[in-house]
Amino acid sequence: MNGQARVRGRKIVLWRHGQTAWNLERRFQGSTDIPLTETGIAQARRSARLLAALRPDAIVSSDLKRAAATADELVSITGLEVRHHEALRETYAGVWQGLTGDEIQEKYGEQYAAWKRGEPVRRGGGELETEVADRAAPVVLAAADALPDGGTLVVASHGGAIRVTIGRLLGLAPHTWESLGGLSNCCWSVLGEGARGWRLMEHNAGTLPEPVLGDDD
């Protein structure tokens, strides 16, 4: 191998859960256990059919209802078992949870502004983003390490938890993680294994990937 690490060609698909009532009301959910709406179930069903075409080898999920129910739609197609992990839950945000964005800015405007500037903030007295990455990223990496060469892992989780996990796996500085845009309900991001580690192949995708045709693949 000429001293170079072997690239195993694995992929990680980080899949956000379907729609909830609190999503529609634009309420900060955090670790509150909110179920999917009927629309959310339909979204999960549709996206599961697409992700099944990637022939995943393993599925892990947050244990919160909205993520677990989303993962179950892929389980029903693939027959794979899903492993649920508390560590893949959304950020705990204390008193912010249950509030709308407008209410958060009205009551905790300075804290909100500091967070948006990329400062380490315990939103609502809850977790730091780096603490979420500390718990979520190792679960994802352990599951990816167990994949066969060329294998695919699907991770059913939450928008904020996915963002910080991507940031950690890509080796980005925490204050830059906000530069990764949000995920729509039941959309996903794909990390592929390259010669220099994990790299972002797709972000906020809702269709199957097309091959990259060009010099910069």
Image: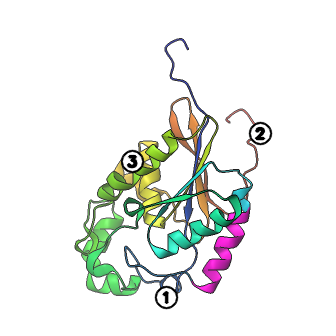
Residue bounds of the magenta highlight: 37-49
Residue 107 lies in the magenta-colored region? no
Q: Are marks 2 and 3 in contact (CB under 8 Å)?
A: no
Dot label at residue 213: 2
Q: Examine the structure image and report whether residue 38 is included in the region drawn in magenta.
A: yes
The residue that disc 3 covers is 138
| Mark 2 vs mark 3, CA separation in Å | 33 Å
C-alpha distance separating marks 1 and 2:
41 Å
SS at circle 3: helix
Q: Nearer the viewer, mark 2 or mark 3?
A: 3
Q: Residue flagged by tag 1: what amino acid is it?
A: Glu
Label 2 element class: loop
Judged left or right of residue 100, residue 188 is: right
| Relative side of 201 to 173, left or right | right
| Quarter that holds the C terminus | top right
Q: Which residue is pictured at 49% across the width and 14% down the height?
A: 3
Q: Which residue is mark 1?
A: 25
In the image, residue 89 lies at what x, y percent?
40, 66
